[in-house]
Image: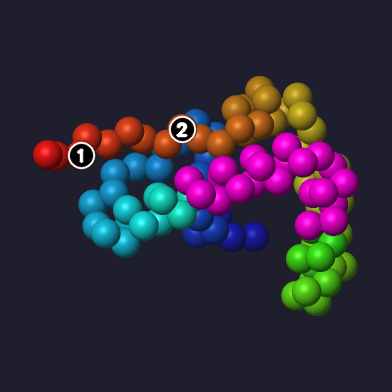
Amino acid sequence: MPSASRTGIRRAGEPLGTASTPRAQQQILADLGFARDVEALLALGPRATAEFLANLGAAHLIRLPLETRLREYVERLGPEKLRVVGADRFPPFPLMVVPR
C-alpha cells in the first residue's frame, strides 16, 4: 500500500505547507476545490454519495475494486476512531500573506 505522502493524502491536522512555486499554488487551490466539492457531495446525503460512487466505478470499470475498498474502510475505521485522531475533517489550509 502506498504511503500517505505518495498518494497526496495528508494526515489529520497536517497543514498543506508553503506554496513556493506556481505549481504548488495551483495544487493548493485544486485541493481546496476538491475538499469543497467532497463536502458538498456529502451534504447531499448517503444516496447521492452512493450513486456517485456507483457511477464512478461503472464509468471506469472499477466498481468491484471500489466496493471492496469501501468495505475495507468501513470495517477498519469508524466514526469514533476518526474523530479521536482528527481524521473526520479536512486538515486546515494555511493562510498566506499576499504581498501588495
Secondary structure beneath disc 1? loop
Occupied quadrant, residue 12: top right
Residue at horizontal 51 percent and vertical 35 percent from the top: 91
Closer to the camera in the image, 41 or 63: 41
Residue 29 percent location from the top left of the image: 41, 51
Residue 82 percent location from the top left of the image: 69, 31
Residue at horizontal 79 percent and vertical 58 percent from the top: 53
Which residue corresponds to mark 1? 98
Q: The C terminus is located in which quarter?
A: top left
Amino acid marked by disc 1: Val
Residue 72 visible from this viewpoint: no
* Region rendered in magenta: 32-52
Decide if residue 8 is on the left or right side of residue 80: left
Amino acid marked by disc 2: Pro
- CB contact under 8 Å: marks 2 and 1: no
Image height check: is 97 above or below 63? above
- Image mark for residue 70: none
Which residue corresponds to mark 2? 92
Closer to the camera in the image, 100 or 59: 100
Residue 2 visible from this viewpoint: yes
Residue 57 percent location from the top left of the image: 80, 67
Residue 73 included in the magenta stretch of the image: no
Residue farthest toward the left in the current orientation of the protein: 100
Closer to the camera in the image, 15 or 2: 15
